[in-house]
Image (cartoon, rainbow, N blue to C red):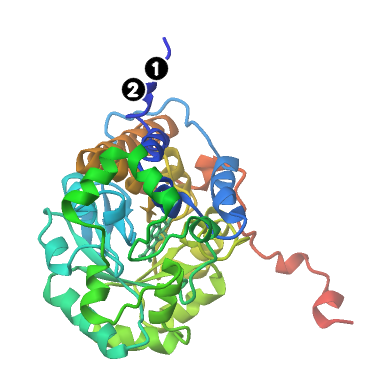
Amino acid sequence: MRLAASDWMHESVEGFRERARRRLPRFVFDFIDGGSGGESTLLENRAALDRIRLVGSGPRDMHECSQETCLFGRTIAMPLVIGPTGLAGAARSGGDAALARAAGVAGIPFVMSSAATATMEAVAEAGEGPKWFQLYVFRDRAVTLRLIERAAALGFEALEVTVDNTIPGRRLRDVRNGFTLPFRWNAGKLCSLLAHPGWTLDMVRVGPPRLKVMAAELDLQATETIAELMQAQLDPSVDWDDIKWVRNAWKGPLIVKGLLDPAQVGKAIDAGVDGIVVSNHGGRQIDGAVATIDILPEFVEAAAGQLTILIDSGFRTGSDIARALALGADAVQVGRATLYALAAAGEAGVRKALDVLREELRVVQMLAGARTPAEFSVASVRGARIPSVRPVAAVAPERLTGS
Ligand SMILES: Cc1cc2nc3c(=O)[nH]c(=O)nc-3n(C[C@H](O)[C@H](O)[C@H](O)COP(=O)(O)O)c2cc1C
């Protein structure tokens, strides 16, 4: 028997995406769904994950199977983190707190964005789970420092500094749709409101979303696109000295988000960073960037166990999570997976999406013979680009001396 469309749409992230597409006005759906430029990285993230195939283990006693894992000294229910997504309140009013509460129910961390539509206080109080704060290094360092201090005072457990957004990517869907903050209305957008009454009534009830963390600290001028608004505030001169400066100001676990070059691993370790997120920002920054799953093994090799390695960009299923674990990631962050669910069905939708991801991961674990997330290994996959051990002895002496 085939699943009815309504069943399928509750049982996969792809189904939540379809429901989000139907519920949101086009300009909001495109803001969430879109990537930069020709969206080649957006597509490649998925294609690269699909190229890696999983291997079933054959018979193995899988009586006991757990998804629990340890991140920065804390046990979490599965190797998954809800990553930072700015403007979550455009998907659904109260979106940031709903994501935080759903993460808490699932027993996984939630990363609050600097571009959140809720206050830091509201998110700190939302639900029981661990919360991390995503920091942008703003041009105004006093503001940046104040955010670090407030995050510490409010009990955020880790700080995630995003370094791949010093200039926002060229997101052509936003340009085409005139996605501005505050929202600016034209005939097309007003028609779109009428066609999406659920979203429209939700926004009328609470008012349009505002970047509450940033608005409280910075003078936000209305701009043509949201990218321009961010560009006016973010500092393009950020380098590893700034990360060291953040390291001095923040005592808890420090994570750098947005690395794609494994050569940066040594600098991260020198700067005293505890973890990194291998990320191409979900295909929203460099169009043409490498897929994160393809470059992950090089990071794992370079870090040699000295950093916690998270990965994001394109992850939609438990099988995707298993692929990253097999290639050495400690956990996966998701952006759109839970945003689609939020847009489609609010907090209940996010809870359901997290249940689906956990169940999908459990099924793969059972069939691939991984009793714990750590038991996935390169033997669990085929088709990945694993860096080969350099065959030094095999190189002819004359090549080594250049003669
Ligand atoms: C609508 C949206 C808003 C985002 N806002 C932020 C943000 O404020 N800070 C940040 O570091 N990353 C942000 N990201 C990037 C995500 O944290 C993450 O890197 C990306 O979504 C991962 O890809 P995925 O959506 O395919 O899971 C955003 C992504 C989306 C889709």
**Residue at 39%, 87% in the rendered image:** 242
Whole-percent x and y of residue 165?
45, 72
Callout 1: SS: loop
Contact between marks 1 and 2 (CB within 8 A): the answer is yes
Count residues near mark 1 (Cα–Cα under 10 Å), then give few for <14, some for 14-19, many for 20+. Answer: few
Considering every residue shown, the one lying at the far front of the view is 187
- Give the residue pinned by disc 1: 3
Marker disc for residue 7: 2
Q: In this view, does 11 lie above or below 104?
A: above
**Residue at 32%, 50% in the rendered image:** 79
Whole-percent x and y of residue 192?
39, 44
**Nearest the camera: 247 or 211?**
211
Marker disc for residue 346: none
**Residue at 22%, 44% in the rendered image:** 201
Count residues near mark 2 (Cα–Cα under 10 Å), then give few for <14, some for 14-19, many for 20+. Answer: few
**Total count of labels:** 2
Q: In this view, does 302 lie above or below 100?
A: below
Q: Is residue 332 above or below residue 242?
A: above
Please state if 68 lies on the left or on the right of 173 as rendered: left
